[in-house]
Amino acid sequence: MKHPASPRVVTLVGPQGVGKTTLFESLLRSTGAEELRTAGGGGAATGRSMTLELSVAHTRFLGEEWTFIDTPGAPEFTQEARQALMVSDAAVVVCDASPERAAALAPLFTFLDARRIPHLLFLNVLEDGGSPVREVLEALQAVSSRPLVMREIPLRQGGHLMGVVDLVSERAWGQGKEGRPALISLPDSDKPREETARRELIERLADLDDTLLAQLLEDVIPPPQSLYEQLERALREDRLVPVFLGSAEQGLGLERLLKGLRHEAPTVDETRERLGIPSEMPVLVQSFKTHHQPHVGKLSMVRVWRGGLQEGDTLANSRVGGVQRVHGTKQTSAGTAREGEVVTVSRVDGLRTGDIADAQGTLTPKDWPLAPPPVHQLAIVAEKRTDDVKLTSALARLVEEDPSLSVDQDADTQMLLLGGQGELHLRQALEHLRTRMRVPVVTKPLPIPYRETLRKTGSHHARFKRQSGGHGQFGDVVVDVKPLPHGEGFRFVSAVVGGAIPKQYIPAVEEGVKDGLKRGPLGFPVVDVEVTLTGGTYHSVDSSDQAFRTTGRLALVEVLPKLEPVLLEPILQVDIHVPNEAIPRAQRLVTSHRGQILGFNTHPEIPGWEVLTAYVPQAEMQGFIVELRSASSGLGSFVTKHDHYSELVGKQAERVVSHQQQAAAER
């Protein structure tokens, strides 16, 4: 049995609505931990009816220290959960008794398996009369590359969960006084079921150990201690997933889960070895969450991988301003932290989320999870123009806190674009800007980078002449303009002969032509055109670079309306990731948004999922994620990239041009 001197860290993960926060609070309550402080009252003890951010709490169980991390289950906040998992010794995957949840767990199992993070499965809310355990496990096994092995079987009476049978010790546990677990007799009617399940457990373990396999073939029954050792080794090496049963709300099965973690979860030394973290460093920490607080500054939540840490120490070339112990929303000054602990350190400006740091500097591990690309964007401006500089700074802090947010600037309008993982995600970000960073913003319609091109070829003679005393301005050019194939961009050709325009003025004409293409007759930049300078004249005194630049611009402004300009809209390639059963609904969604389906393939990483590839106009993507999540039980996502421009005609084009003209008039 393990007796680690350092705390162990366990993260609770799973889909939204399966009871992770209830389990989190019940585990703390059952171990006598300090009650979590509420944040505004109501809801769960964390102050939230729906978990939007990770929450950390500490407790003791049978003399050993534990840190539990509760994480959000909504797809918008996947990055938050993944970051916590990266510093954990083990994870508890929480699921209810619904086979339909398998699709939601597939991405999580894929992440855990790819990074070899040891994990247990806790089937919650079994007292509600959900599907049989074996039916649930069959569905979950289809999306897990590791074998799911039952550690317990349920005992029911009248359809209600009354207790569980530990398949290693073969003892049955029910609920005694004050909700504490109590030994109960195993009913004779359940003994054949228990024997069958125990045999299956031993066979699964024998697949991983030759000695146990030999005993099994000789009908030798291994002692419980041997099975405990096998389970500990298999979990530490991430070779199987033990399955525990219970009810977080009623407190059933929690002590068995805690004892399973106590026997089998890796220690900080074993986790450090799994991650390849050096063990000889005097102090080594890793940040997995960054937070900025008014009047306090930057706070980094860290796991201490090696050595001890105290206020005043140097970390990442910065002096540690403080070391705080976190328990829910409560932070208390600790002064020091020892190996294995999770604490918050203040004012270590060089420490970013994901960084492993010693006194001299930092490094980011290669396998640190990259934030997913944004699937929803909002154009934002500061509510007060005087807050423009503050907004830029606040957005930088916001993205540092949550890497799954992004900030871009639209090339045409220079508007700031805030991107995230969904509608709820961006609402939360805007609320943080308003309340914590004191920079309220307003949202604007998302700019779409429309373009225009030409259908006809034409020539034009333009002259610019101005006399205002002294030297005047004079430029005279003849240009041929023709459309190019889509995607060719802009091409300028000089065909001037005989010195009609001196060579030193030709670059100025080209710059003027580019100026004239920045805003075409329909109100958008003009692309895919070739402009050939064929002739012109100059004045030895009044001609200049500026005069010829102005003339080049006038030539384009005057000729473009005559060449049948046509609107172009940007088309994105969209790779939509959904569970298999949601593919028909995703197809209908694409076609309803003027999309063109290109095909679909099996997801390369997530079992039971597919990737639908389509062309969709960028103008149709605003709010697309909301509809996709609705069509895929909240699970769908997508990745986009610009592919090409396509002509847009008819009433849709008229509406776009009218809106652009109105916006220009208002400016």
Image (cartoon, rainbow, N blue to C red):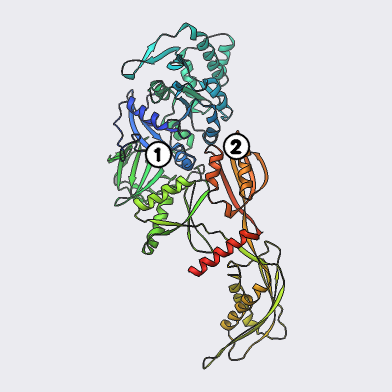
Residue 369 in percent (x, y) is at 50, 43
Residue 537 left/right relative to 349:
right
- Give the mark nearest the N terminus, 1 or 2: 1
Amino acid at pointer 2: Ala
Q: Can see residue 387?
A: yes
State which mark lies toward you, 1 or 2. 2
Q: Nearer the viewer, residue 568 or 333?
A: 568
Residue 37 in percent (x, y) is at 30, 36
Determine whether the residue tagged by mark 1 lies in a helix, strand or loop: loop
Q: Can see residue 604?
A: no
Q: Is residue 436 above or below residue 578?
A: below
- Picture quarter containing residue 562? bottom right
Q: Quadrant of the N terminus?
A: top left
Q: Is residue 505 above or below residue 191?
A: below
Determine whether the residue tagged by mark 2 lies in a helix, strand or loop: helix
Tell me if mark 2 has few (under 14), some (14-19) or many (20+) residues whose alpha carbon lies within 10 angstroms of its own.
some
Q: Residue furthest bottom?
A: 470
The Cα atoms of the two marked residues, 1 and 2, are separated by 29 Å
Residue 429 in percent (x, y) is at 42, 49
Residue 446 left/right relative to 510:
left
Reading the image, the residue beneath label 1 is 54
Q: Is residue 177 above or below residue 38?
A: above
Reading the image, the residue beneath label 2 is 582
Amino acid at pointer 1: Leu
Residue pictured at 50% horizontal, 12% vertical:
194
Residue pictured at 62% horizontal, 46% vertical:
590
Q: Are marks 1 and 2 in contact (CB under 8 Å)?
A: no
Total numbered circles: 2
Residue 87 in percent (x, y) is at 43, 37
